[in-house]
Image (spheres, rainbow, N blue to C red):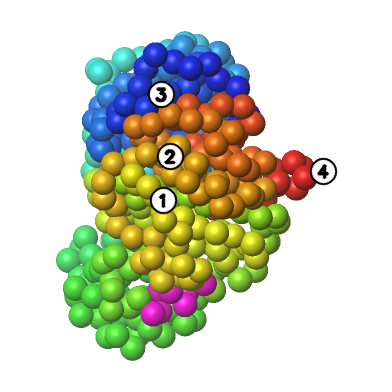
Amino acid sequence: MAQMNMKKPSKEKTFEGGNVSKINAAEQLKRSVMSTMLWEKGFYESGEEIAERIFRLTKLVDKETALSIMLEAKQVQKLRHAPLLMAVAMSENGYLKKENLNAIITRADELSEFLSLYWMKGKRPISHQIRKGLALAFPKFNEYQLAKYDRAKTVKLKDVLKMVRPKPANEEQAGLWKRLISGELQTPDTWEVALSSGKDKKETFERMLLENSLGDLAFIRNLRNMIQSGVKSELVKKSFSERTWSKILPFQFVGAARYAPNYEPEIETAMLKSMVDLEKLQGSITILVDTSGSMDDKISGKSEMKRIDAASGLAILARELSNDIEIYSFNNSAKLVPARHGFALRDAIGRPTGGTEMWGSIRQVAKNRKSDLMIVITDEQTSDNGSIVDANSDLLAVINVAHYHNGVGYGNKSIHISGWSENVITYLMEYMKNYAR
């Protein structure tokens, strides 16, 4: 996820004109992969440009580096499509082994999605390693999982099954695969299946809430659907109070509040509940949240969540986990954010506007505060220049919430982190423990 940076300056610039670090193909690949929803347009780059860069860079780096980035993207950052695209590129170099492909297929639909990407530029034979990798992955999935993703796509699950011919472990599994081929799988009871079959939205969601059969993430993601279909408010609020929320991240709550403002009190309570048992951060911390105009860009074309939501979510999490923290927002200059919590902190950080002077903002903050760790959450598109010395902190961590080709220059003794999730905070916790020794 991160590495110490001792970079040489580059003649290239960020999209706003600031100096960038001259980084190698492996570091460029990591920057492009870790924060991308593949094929989605960014504020400065098209989805096609990003995908083509990932494919090209994967083929440029050595086998071990490509494999490491692919597995981190899948297993740590929980990305779906970028690791599959990397696997296609690795197969063209002869790097991809059956166990590697098996490792990144964790959902049944990824069996067919990999082949769709592999045949993106035309149908062609598949290698022995690909056949074996898909055959290894197929037995992972039970009837519910296969039925859930048995969809009418260009490449169907039964097509993959016929092609790779995995060996069933027993008669039960053999029978399951026969039902897949004949189209006789038992229909799973999911909200997607219910609604796609034409069932009433309101009745479906109310039934699933009463049966407690809607998972936490599905619940959060379907708040809009429940509101629009007229699900009883008391049922929604009751479901909020009964959940543990142990695997939902702050930025997901921030995103949900954007399209479900009437439930903001319940969403905030759930968000704070999700962080109660997390380990605390040690030492003094300063956080700068980028609020320039480009942070208003959506994370995905299919999502309401924006880059500022991801940044605010990380700031909210850090606030709850630290006893010595100051948070600033910055665009052309920095301002101290009041010591608030939850959505009040999100509101105080503010909405994106203006240009970006990251290093000038860092220097402005550093005049008044010395800290053990300074964290800058940004899309790395600044117009000015600087270095770790400007931060007046023992360590500078730049968390990149975008996927652009070039980012800011760092200097010595700084950590660059591509990607955003709770793993960012987990990593910093471990790093600070070791750094303090």
> Is residue 184 visible in the rendered structure shown here?
no
Query: How far across and down, in percent of the image, does residue 46 sit?
Result: 24, 30
Question: Within 10 Å of the Cα at label 2, are there few (<14), some (14-19), or many (20+) other Cα atoms?
Answer: many
- Which residue is denoted by mark 4 in the rendering? 437
Query: How far across and down, in percent of the image, does residue 250 sit?
Result: 47, 62
Please tell me which of labels 2 and 1 falls first in the chain.
Answer: 1
Please tell me which of labels 2 and 3 falls first in the chain.
Answer: 3
Going by the numbered disc 1, the residue's amino acid type is Ala
SS at mark 2? helix
Query: How far across and down, in percent of the image, does residue 247 sit?
Result: 53, 61
- Which residue is denoted by mark 1 in the rendering? 334
- Which residue is denoted by mark 3 in the rendering? 19
Q: CA distance from mark 2 to mark 1?
A: 8 Å
Residue at 19%, 75% in the rendered image: 229
Please tell me which of labels 2 and 4 falls first in the chain.
Answer: 2
Up the image or down, 125 lies above or below 297; here it is above
> Is residue 429 visible in the rendered structure shown here?
yes
Q: Residue furthest right?
A: 437
Q: Nearer the viewer, mark 4 or mark 3?
A: 3
- Which residue is denoted by mark 2 in the rendering? 360
Q: CA distance from mark 2 to mark 4?
A: 31 Å
On-image quarter of the N terminus:
top right
Q: Is residue 404 magenta?
A: no
SS at mark 4? loop
Q: CA distance from mark 1 to mark 4?
A: 32 Å
The region drawn magenta spans 265-272
Q: CA distance from mark 4 to mark 3?
A: 33 Å
